[in-house]
Each structure stands twice: as structure tokens, then as C-alpha cells.
Image (spheres, helix red, strand yellow):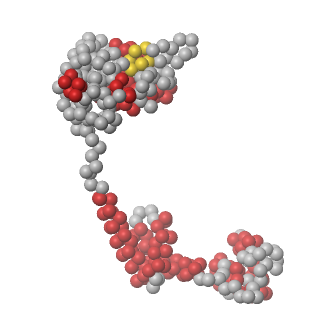
Amino acid sequence: MGYKLYREVKVWAPDTLTKGEKLAALVLADDANDVSRLTYHGVHDPEIMRQAMVPDDRAMRRVLAKLQKEKVVEHAGGGHNGRVSKYRFLHLAPSGWAAPGDASKAGENNPPTGSVEDHQADGFDVPDVGKQGENNPPTDEADAKNHPPTGGVGGSFSTRRRVKTTRPTPPYTSTSSSSPRDAGDQPSKTKTKKTSSIRDRIIDATGATPEEAQALIDQIRPEVKHSLSGLITSLIENEDMHERLRKLKAARAPRPRPARAQTKCTRHYLALPCDACASDIKTRAFGDVTKLLHDHGPDKRWDLAQNEALAQHLGESA
Ligand SMILES: [Zn+2]
């Protein structure tokens, strides 16, 4: 990925490019190798064209013609007999410039923002711009000497464009860590406070323990559509909260397992809790399970005794 090249194009592409041409140059730079400065995918690659918002091959050829004219890229082979057409990025930055965030002197030589004028309307038409040279990003030669390239890729920025300078330091010199991050505390404190008052309301309304109230909140939270507080209020008002607490307590109650408890269902020969009986209850086939519970009693058939749907059915039919 051509991160440094991308930054170089972003900062130093000639102002004579249209927005569309500059976007295409940025996309191609991002796709190019930082060291060889060669584009990787074909310039007519559909994804490259899509990212660059170039509508078709013809428009891309016009963009490339302009980029070559403005000495942004040069053709580096390919494009015939099915070979991928390669382009090489020329050196746009003055000697000594380093991509921001890359070299030790990051930021010192950056040109300012706001200097890119809209020479043309958006689009891919290539107007005849004969101002080559006038708009070159200038450089301060003295400054460049004081800050030579740091070797590696940085050193590859040549002095192909020797120009003078006045571009001041840009605003994005460093990734400042001074921005306050402690603001993140505030919402969570508020949230905790809010939740605890909701918990108090549940405790007041139902007599739940604080721990049970918290468990109910955790259970209810995924169901919230608008506000947790609003849902809690309506659950308390229509007594659903009491029902939920009752279920919570039932689910948490230790299962009675007397020593003589059956280990298998006498009808299905499955270990208790019997899955077959449970599935009968789910399909509301209460006949067999009611008989089993009646014959063996709630101690032996604890799984049936604890089944809420069955208990409800028996309650209704009693
Ligand atoms: Zn069974």
C-alpha cells in the first residue's frame, strides 16, 4: 500500500488537477508501491475505477493523459497484448519533505491546506492548462538542507522539481494527545446512577432484593425499545414485574432431589428431566405428563412438578 505516496500526492499534487483527477491520482497512489512508485493493479481495474469514480475506460485514459501532462505519473509499460498497464509516480514533493507521521521531522515541511483551488468544475474532461510550473509546490532549499531525507523510502524523494517556497507549516503537525479523553467517564457514571434508581424502583415495587432487581434489569434490558426506565415503569404498573420476579425466584430455587428420586421417566425411559415429557408439554399434550405426575408425585417427578406450563395448565383445569 502506498501510504507515503498517497500522502505525497495528497499534499503535493499540482493545483492544476481537477478534483476528479486528483481523486484518481490518490486512488492510484494508494494502490502503488511506495518504493518502486509503480501502480499495482491495472489502471483500468474495475475496483480502481470505482474508487476513483471514473465512469469508463475512456474517461480513465483522459485522466491519465492529464496526470502525465502534469508530471504526476509516467507510463511504465504494459497496456498491450493483455498486459496490465503500469504507471510510475514521479516525484512531486521537494527534496527533504517527509510524509507526515513518517519521518522524525514530520510536519515541518508540510504545505498548508486550503491552497488547492478549483480550477475546473468536477469531472474528467481535460482542459488545456498551460500553466505548468506556476503552480508547483515550492520548497525551501535551505530548509531542505537542514532536514535531509532520513534514508530508506524518504530518501527517494528526488529534487526533480526544484522550486522555491513559502508554504508555511500546516495545522496537522502532530497527533496531539492533549485532547481530553476523560469525557468518556461522564456518561457511564450517569448511566450507573440511572440504573441504580431504576433498581430502587423495582425493589420498592416488588420487594425484590437488590441482586434480584439487578438480574431483572439485565433480563429486561435487551427488550428495551425506547428507554429502559419507561419499560420498567410500565412493567411495574401492569404487575408484570411481580410475575418476572416470581419466575426469577422459581428458576433460582434449588431443585428438590430427594434420595429416592426417580432417575428415569417410567414412560420414556429417559433420564430426568425427561426431554420427551418436556416436549409433550411444549406441544400442550398434557395427558401423559399429568398422569405421570399424579402417579409418581412431585418428589419423584420433580421435573414435571417444576414445569411452569404444566403447572399453569393444571391450575387452569382445576
Ligand atoms: Zn417422559
Q: Looking at the image, which residue is at 37% across and 14% down?
A: 68
Task: Locate residue 4, reporting x and y percent.
Answer: 37, 31
Residue 196 in view of the camera:
yes
Left or right placement of residue 108 versus residue 229 in this view: left
Instruction: Look at the picture and state if 221 lies above or below 57.
Output: below
Choose top left, top right, bottom left or bottom right for residue 257: bottom right
Instruction: Look at the picture and state if 183 lies above or below 287.
Output: above
Task: Locate residue 250, reporting x and y percent.
Answer: 58, 81
Residue situated in front as seen by the camera: 139 or 225: 139
Left or right placement of residue 236 versus residue 106 in this view: right
> Residue furthest toward the left?
166
Task: Locate residue 213, reporting x and y percent.
Answer: 46, 78
Q: Quadrant of the N terminus?
A: top left
Q: Looking at the image, which residue is at 30% across and 12% down?
A: 128
Choose top left, top right, bottom left or bottom right for residue 27: top left
Residue 280 in view of the camera:
no
Task: Locate residue 97, reporting x and y percent.
Answer: 28, 28
Q: Looking at the image, which residue is at 32% across and 37% down?
A: 101
Instruction: Look at the picture and state if 300 lies above or below 197.
Output: below
Residue situated in front as seen by the camera: 161 or 126: 161
Q: Looking at the image, which residue is at 21% across and 22% down?
A: 141
